[in-house]
């Protein structure tokens, strides 16, 4: 907050609101949603919650974009469902081998982590793609005038967006085990699990 004020960034209010929101949301989530859900472990509570966080993630990701289009929120929802859903399904069936496969103690945290990682990458990628198209309209129109298909005209912007989206993940992966430890492994270690098992 002090740095934002000193540099004239104008982010003081947003930082305070975001930090306060984070603390309140985590407290409410733990007390009123996760604790009852974990104790009952019933799919009629788990899947509506997962659908809710998908919709919320799509809303949050689309609200941060500089440039938007009409069905952007729907596209985020489809991308999150396909991307995070396939990762969670693989983890539940192959890696964790859950029984029952909807076990809330594992399914909910893994879904949240997968969705959180995908939200960041997808939002960065789409922001880069739309900004490059909007601010480089002359380049796109020139390619179209010279006979390029719309996919060819947008390809440089798509490449740039993919690089922007994957860079944070690649940076994290390159220092994994050296500088940082994955979140779930950290939780297992703090819980007293042996490093190789964690």
Image: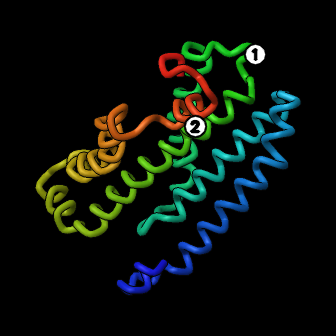
- Identify the residue at horizontal 44%, vertical 35% (top origin): 181
- In front here: 33 or 55? 33
Sequence-first disc among 2 and 1: 2
Within 10 Å of the Cα at label 2, are there few (<14), some (14-19), or many (20+) other Cα atoms?
A: some
Looking at the image, residue 174 lies above or below residue 19: above
**Residue at the spot of label 2:** 81
- In front here: 128 or 27? 27
- Identify the residue at horizontal 81%, vertical 32% (top origin): 38
| Position of residue 115 in the picture relative to residue 103 (left or right) | left
Question: What is the tally of numbered marks visible in this picture?
Answer: 2
Within 10 Å of the Cα at label 1, are there few (<14), some (14-19), or many (20+) other Cα atoms?
A: few
**Residue at the spot of label 1:** 100
| Position of residue 63 in the picture relative to residue 34 (left or right) | left
Q: Secondary structure at mark 2?
A: helix
Residue 43: x and y in percent read 81, 28
- In front here: 41 or 135? 41
Residue 148: x and y in percent read 17, 49
Looking at the image, residue 90 lies above or below residue 143: above
Q: Secondary structure at mark 1?
A: loop
Is label 2 or label 1 in front? 1
| Position of residue 80 in the picture relative to residue 44 (left or right) | left
């Amino acid at each position: 907050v002090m740095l934002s004020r000193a540099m004239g960034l104008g982010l003081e209010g947003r930082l305070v609101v975001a930090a306060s929101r984070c603390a309140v949301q985590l407290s409410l989530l733990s007390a009123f949603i996760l604790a009852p859900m974990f104790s009952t472990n019933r799919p009629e509570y788990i899947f509506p919650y997962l659908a809710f966080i998908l919709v919320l993630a799509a809303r949050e990701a689309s609200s941060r974009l500089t440039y938007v289009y009409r069905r952007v929120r729907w596209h985020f929802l489809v991308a999150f469902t396909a991307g995070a859903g396939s990762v969670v399904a693989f983890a539940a069936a192959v890696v964790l081998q859950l029984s029952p496969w909807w076990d809330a103690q594992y399914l909910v945290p893994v879904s949240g982590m997968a969705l959180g990682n995908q939200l960041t990458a997808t939002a960065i990628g789409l922001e880069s793609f739309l900004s490059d198209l909007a601010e480089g309209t002359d380049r796109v129109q020139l390619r179209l005038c010279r006979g390029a298909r719309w996919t060819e005209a947008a390809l440089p912007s798509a490449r740039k967006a993919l690089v922007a989206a994957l860079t944070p993940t690649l940076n994290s992966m390159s220092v994994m085990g050296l500088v940082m430890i994955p979140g779930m492994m950290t939780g297992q270690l703090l819980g007293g699990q042996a490093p190789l098992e964690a």
